[in-house]
Amino acid sequence: MADFGFSIAKTRSVKLSDTDMSKYRQLLELVPSFKRCISCGGCTASCSARQFTDFNIRKTHCYFRRGQYDKLEQELQKCMLCGKCTLVCPRGVNLRSLIINMRQILTNTNEIIG
Ligand code: SF4
Ligand code: SF4
């Protein structure tokens, strides 16, 4: 077979019925606007932290939605909480609040920010 210099990625699937979704459900209660996210990527495209790091807010909240929490706490520290993503979101998702609450849920703190 010809070597094209790349290979097709393996199929990835997440079995949600076997995944602990409690943190995601907790997040939806705290930030209901997250239900409106259509994963368009506008937040990542406008992200200030993205200009200086490999931070990808869309990827981060997509992982959270799938119950894949590994390394997200560390990843979310790259966000500067500038709020630009909240301004551009076409679905009115309160991303700044989403990020603060994702951080708090992942660190198991009890303080709630609306
Ligand atoms: S800009 Fe809004 S709708 Fe688009 S991916 Fe980000 S949070 Fe979701
Ligand atoms: S609040 Fe965080 S994720 Fe949103 S644009 Fe600013 S640095 Fe990026």
Image (spheres, rainbow, N blue to C red):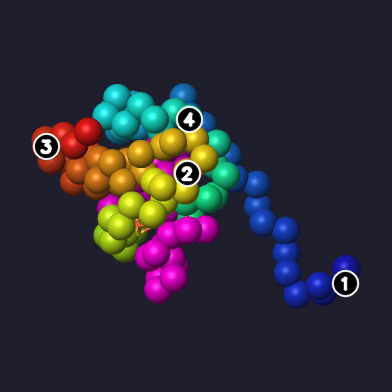
Rendered image: mark on residue 70: none
Screen quadrant of the C terminus? top left
Residue annotated with mark 1: 2
| Closer to the eye: label 3 or 1 | 3
Question: Residue at image x 41%, y 47%?
Answer: 87
Q: Nearer the viewer, residue 14 or 51?
A: 51
| First-in-chain label (2 vs 4) | 4
How far apart are the two marked residues, 2 and 4, measured between alpha carbons? 10 Å
Quarter of the figure with residue 63: top left
Do we see residue 71 in this rendering?
no
Q: Quadrant of ligand 2?
A: bottom left
Residue annotated with mark 2: 89
| Closer to the eye: label 1 or 4 | 4
| First-in-chain label (2 vs 1) | 1
Residue annotated with mark 3: 111
Mark 2 C-beta to ligand 1 under 8 Å? yes
